[in-house]
Amino acid sequence: MNQWHQRILGSFTADLSRLWVACDPDGVLLDEKLLSELRARGFEVMGYDDPFRFRAEYEERYRTAWDANEQAPSPALIVHLRHDNANDLPWDIVHNARPAVRLNLAELFPRLAYGAVRQVEPERLGSLFDAHQTELQSARGESESKDFILEHVYQLTPRSIRTPVDFWRETLRLHFAGRALPEPFAEHVATILHGRGLLVGHPVSEWLSSRNALLRVVQDAWYRNLEKLKLDGRHVPELNAPADGAGETGTEIEIPFDHTDVHAIIDSMFLDGSLHPLTVSTVPTTMPGWIKAGVVADKSSQFALAAKSIEALAAAVPEADSSHKQWSDFAKRFGEMLSRVHDLPGKDAGERMTAVSARIKEIQALADERLQAWVIAGHYADLILQPSIKGPVMVHHVPRFLRQRRSAGEARVALLVFDGLAFDQWVRIREHLIAAQQPFAFDENTAFAWLPTVTSVSRQALFSGLRPREFDDSIDHTNKEETLWKAFWQNEGGIASGEVMYRRALHQVEQLDALEADIASRKHTVLGLVIDEVDERLHKERSKEDVALWIGRWLGSGFVERLFAFLLSEGFSIYVTADHGNVDAVGIGRPNQGVIAETRGERVRVYRSDPLRAESAVAYPGTAALDIAGLPANFKPLFAGGRTAFVPNGDQVVVHGGVSVEELVVPFVRVSDVNGAG
């Protein structure tokens, strides 16, 4: 345990009290490692965001047990406040708890400017605390504090960047290591560099703070470099529209790919799927060696690149104690790789494809095993507490994030839920739009679906902004989604019901005339649209490869590009997500007892009592009876093990409901117009 964790955990001792209050305006306690260590010490952290929801959960899970002198879910409970005033809590909580523990970054880092420290992500505060204790003897101002944090937390010293090679080496290194800069630090670096005349007129701060923006620039510069070398080919697949390849001056960005420090990182980015190669007919022998990782010339080189990418992915499978960000990053890489594999040529040709498929199954098995252990260890439960200011961590955070975006100036927001869309299938949609030369850019992130990953649980959480225990009365159907969606915006967004639209069962281009007319005439402020083509199709196919082929045919109708273009033209900010993903699975038989929360979510069975669930678990070895935080107390899921499903023995199916990266981690993407709309 590091000094930082010792400093925070020293305030909490479970044997002193069973009820605690933490006043934590900066979210210090929400670091996943701290939450894990608190859990190991006998603490549960419960957020106090809504008085009524808190009271219902507190009374049911803790107060009733304590009053009856029975065992509560954990020996001690910490009520977590995201501000400084404990007196905002109910009297009985304050009266029965120990004096509030106050966690304030200004006091924890007294020699650094608070405005700078509060921008540092919670998981990086440990590194900063060590440096603060050992490297600082006197107080620093705002600018000096940013320099100190950049050096000791992000390993970046902007005043030593003097050439374009320095800039691209350090920027690529930052993003490859997963250390994108918070915007204030990125702006600080840009000011320093522009002051020296470096990259003047270009959006340096955006490249430093946004991995998506940086990759668009690098991808475009890569293709232009190859064109200069007279290598023309097919961009398969491009990452994004290349409009960000030029700065405000309109000049093209030149990246020194031939420099050793730069192309070493670029090679790794091609392998992990961050960048996409150019497919060409031949590569002349006179071509420089640095281009090899980003060019494929024939079937053999395509398979070779796929094999290398798969091995890089195998080495990156997160551990059972990894952060949710590591799992999210892995899910994106896995989706990119799986989509790439679906496009490999000559699938019926034999041995190479068989070897690729076998290796992917090995990675899936390992990832499934570790992800399930991650859930059992309580890390999934910690996601409920995570703030949604920078983006939703779980799908029920989405409405609050959109509300924040409206407050930040996005007057009209459209949430497009592609029911059942796994990340690899989003990649296929993205590639189609780029191949069709649509003027869209994509800011790609992820969110975690709710377990079990079935529509009535996860999609209802997505539209309501609630945890499943808070819509227990409708958890087995989706009939209340429209009511819950509109209630959220009335109660928390102050928007009249008439300004909020909800539509589902959208997938045909013929439906768009009526939808567009309705939106244009009523001037809705908030849209919630369910596009169900993927979910409808996956239950009819025997493999995800077949689903990918069908999605390709469906995209040919023009439904997606027309819908995106219309919404952007109407001034909407578009956010695309899914309620769950899907996996290939093999049937192990269908239990007779138990209630399926959704008839086609065949990766899970739900029981209303532990004895019934235990009986089925014995009958079906390899299944997993997991208690998921946030579900109703009498909602007991039994998950099919591995890549199996509760369907007739041996059936090959594409399903959802279970615990896998492909089902649990879904895309969350902001779609904008490269010309500035949206």
Image (spheres, helix red, strand yellow):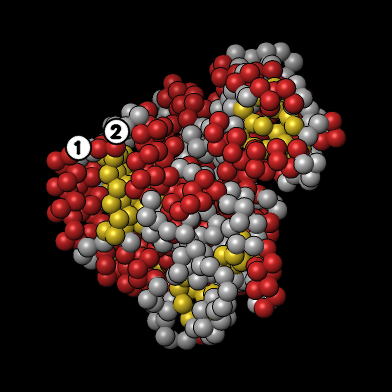
Is 227 situated left or right of 630 in this image? left
Q: Position of residue 337 (x, y in %)?
A: 48, 64
Q: Position of residue 382 (x, y in %)?
A: 63, 44
Q: Nearer the viewer, residue 86 or 394?
A: 86
Give, as a three-letter code, the residue at label 1: Lys
- Residue 76, quarter of the rendered image: top right
* Residue that numbered label 2 is attached to: 496
Q: Sequence order check: which comes first, mark 1 or mark 2?
A: 2
Q: Nearer the viewer, mark 1 or mark 2?
A: 2
Quarter of the figure with the N terminus: top right
Does dot 1 land on a helix, a strand or a loop? loop
The relative height of residue 524 versus residue 666 in the rendered view (above or below) is above
Is 580 situated left or right of 235 in this image? right
How far apart are the two marked residues, 1 and 2, measured between alpha carbons?
Answer: 12 Å
* Residue that numbered label 1 is attached to: 523
- Residue 44, quarter of the rendered image: top right
